Amino acid sequence: MRWRSELQIALVALGLSAGIACAQSLEFVSRYTWKSAVEDFGGFSSLELSRNGESFTTTTDKGLIAEGRIVRDGGRIRGLDNLRFGRILNPQGVPWRSYRTDAEGLAISPTGTIYISFEGTHRVVAYDSPRSAGRPLPDMPWRGSLQSNSSIEALAIDAAGVLYTLPERSGDLNRPFPVFRYRNGRWDKTLSIARRDGFLPVGADFGPDGRLYLLERELKGLNGFATRVRSFALSRNSLTDERELLRTAGGTHDNLEGIAVWSTPEGVIRITMISDDNFRFFQRTEIVDYRLVN
């Protein structure tokens, strides 16, 4: 119910959530429900924003890539405009088909190269533009160990153009999530992230502060999805200074899977997330904004 969701958001804003204690937290700003008659609309699992938080790119489980602009009034989301939709193309320049369409992660390099991770067949593909043919990156050596429908959902890129991705499941409740890093034409898995409680990683992004922000979700049965956001400092061979910034109750938001971190002209870090409605009539495509507060 609407009133329950707003109450849950208010409680989170007051800091009444469990987890790793830190001085920072996320404060709810606004939400917007996106509706469209475009064929295969829905299933949004990723999100990238421009530095000012306006222009966006997102991908879907059915192989769509969408671009547009988020319209805000007084800092709150009021709508979307300049929308453009297209099919994600394979190396032959034609749309991916069948289970190969399941685009989950998205990262755009400082030079504009678009990277998309796919879950149906575990791979990362590079694109020069949203309408160009794909260029698959070398396969991960650990590709065979990834679980079906639970593989590389989160994808992020740092200021140096290094890619980071991790599977949705680690294989054991007490096993950390391995972080696969792609640099200089090779993959490594030196890094890892602790697995805590029942949350699973679904999105990641580097913020303007250089920290890695990880979006996680947990299905709470009939109560819907709970959301958690953690951030980490990146050193050469480890992720440290874990901070839990947000943990919502089930049903506060829909199935948030894409995350983008940006900054206002005043230097305030904002986090925007988008939900995957799983193409179900009782779910919704929701775009939500939070701000980082100390």
Image (tube, helix red, strand yellow):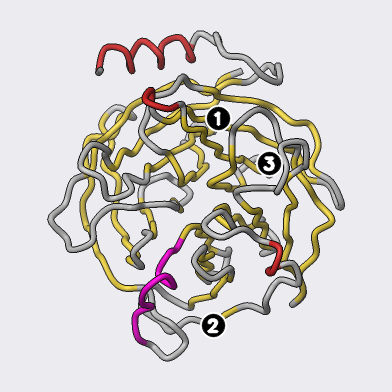
**Residue on which the image places disc 2:** 135
The label shown at residue 228 is: 1
**Residue on which the image places disc 3:** 211
In this rendering, is residue 244 above or below 120? above
Q: What residue type is labelled 1?
A: Arg
Neighbours of disc 2 within 10 Å: few (<14), some (14-19), many (20+): some
Neighbours of disc 1 within 10 Å: few (<14), some (14-19), many (20+): many
Q: What stretch is highlighted in magenta?
A: 94-103
Compare residues 39 and 213 and report the one nearer the observer: 39
In this rendering, is residue 234 above or below 271? below
Q: What residue type is labelled 3?
A: Arg
Instruction: Give me the residue at 35% from left, 86% from top.
Output: 94
In the rendered image, residue 31, in percent from the top left (x then y), is placed at: 31, 30
Residue 294 lies left or right of residue 185; in this view the side is left
In this rendering, is residue 290 above or below 19? below
Quadrant showing the N terminus: top left
- Mark whose residue sits in front, 3 or 1: 1
Between discs 1 and 2, the one toward the N terminus: 2
Q: What element carries label 3?
A: loop
Q: For the residues marked 3 and 2, what is the alpha-carbon distance in whole angstroms?
A: 28 Å
